[in-house]
Image (cartoon, rainbow, N blue to C red):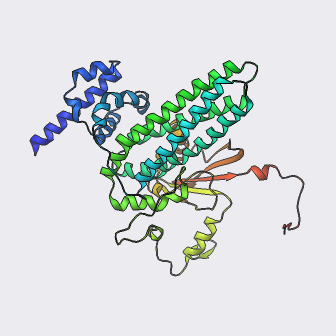
Amino acid sequence: MSEYIRSREQRQEALKGVIRRLHRGESVETVKADFAQLLNDVGPSEIAEIEQALIAEGLPETEVKRLCDVHVAVFRESLDTQAPPQERPGHPIHTFRAENDAAEAVLGELERAIAALEEEPDDEARWERVAALLSILREYDRHYLRKENLLFPYLEKHGFAGPSSVMWAIHDDVRDEWKSLDQLLGRGPGEDPVIAVAQVRNQWTRLATTIREMFYKEANILFPTALEKLSEEEWREIRAQEAEIGYSYVEPQDWPTNGRPAESELAPESVSRAGQLSLDTGALTIEQISLLLGNLPLDITYVDADDEVRFFSHGQERVFSRSTAVIGRKVQKCHPPQSVHRVQQILDAFRAGTRDVAEFWIQMNGRFVHIRYWALRDQVGTYQGTLEVVQDITALRELQGERRLVDWEG
């Protein structure tokens, strides 16, 4: 056994050496030539483990992200020889793959539409066609949201946090590229349609390449690794939470339960519902508390003193996606990589007692969203966590004058 461990450790060190040489600027061809035999049978989970180990040793996640495509390139021949594991219809991985197939079809439609636009750069109808197809492509974001809010938290429970963070950062790159292309299309042909279409083509090429490279990383690294790490019970928990976030282009089939409870019956365990809980200003049953919190016209999230998410309200219309997979997850892992430092700054200030409130407001999809954070302290002033409140105040900002009576329509 010790001989096997040494062999495995030596192999991992050799593979980490491959990545380090790439980060020093050596070419893919040179590294592949020097490590040809070692690279012949590298598996998907091995690549993820190597990246995770390097991040744990201090290699910045941003650096791993920067050369992520280079990592894949050096291992690609080995990955291409391994048949991806197949899952039954209804399994989350089967759904992820079906979404990628559907998204590839949308990418093809967009490519043809942009090619047609290049033939007639001043044709308004062709500009509108490309814009409409881009809007359809952006529905693919739900695929990324399910990865970020369901699959990544479960992988983190198995010690895989680094690769998840790298992928999330790439998701955000795609979102930025969507926005940039949308802005170009919104300007239309302008005074020089040829230049305008050339800008669209350049932006489109970056976007399509990033999305397709992620297809490959998912199919050949992420999905096989996840299938290896997660238990069937964990997959069922993920399946039970998927619908709340939604799907892109497809609806999953029923997943055979093999005698287990149906997915619709799966629910987190709760404390006994008998009796009431005594509060400072009254007493409520668990059902009543759930009703109150679930019908607030805003979203609330409680993060405890250890920075772990302990609760979020489950309203009918949430501003940001949440799933029960985040319960117990470090709040830093629930935010895009580029905004984690802001979250940490707030938590550090609250914990140090130098601040009690932080607030932001953003415009998102035509809505005006107000975000506030409060430090929660007990009677002796000890920090006990943070309360986040998110509210869509678009309609509130438009109110004028006053209304003193109920005004119901119909």
Question: As rendered, which of 248 and 344 lies closer to the eye?
Answer: 248
The count of marks equals: 0
Rendered residue at 47%/54% (across/down): 326
Q: Quadrant of the C terminus?
A: bottom right
Q: Is residue 255 above or below residue 276?
A: above
Work out whether residue 172 or residue 218 is closer to the camera in this orientation and state it: 218
Viewer-side residue, 106 vs 311: 106
Q: Is residue 269 left or right of residue 373?
A: left
**Above or below 16: residue 325:** below
The residue lying at 55 percent from left, 44 percent from top is 141
Q: Quadrant of residue 71?
A: top left
Name the residue located 39 percent from the left edge and 52 percent from the top edge: 154
Q: Position of residue 13 (x, y in %)?
A: 22, 32
Q: Position of residue 363 (x, y in %)?
A: 69, 42
Question: From this viewpoint, is residue 31 visible?
Answer: yes
The correct choice, above or below, for 165 with respect to 288 in the image is above
**Is 183 on the left or on the right of 286, as rendered?**
right
Residue 330, can we see it? no
- Please determine whether, in this image, residue 135 is positioned above or below residue 317: above
Q: Is residue 185 left or right of residue 336?
A: right
> Where residue 276 appears, x then y in whole percent?
55, 79
Residue at horizontal 22 percent and vertical 32 percent from the top: 40
* Residue 325 in picture, x, y percent from top left: 45, 56
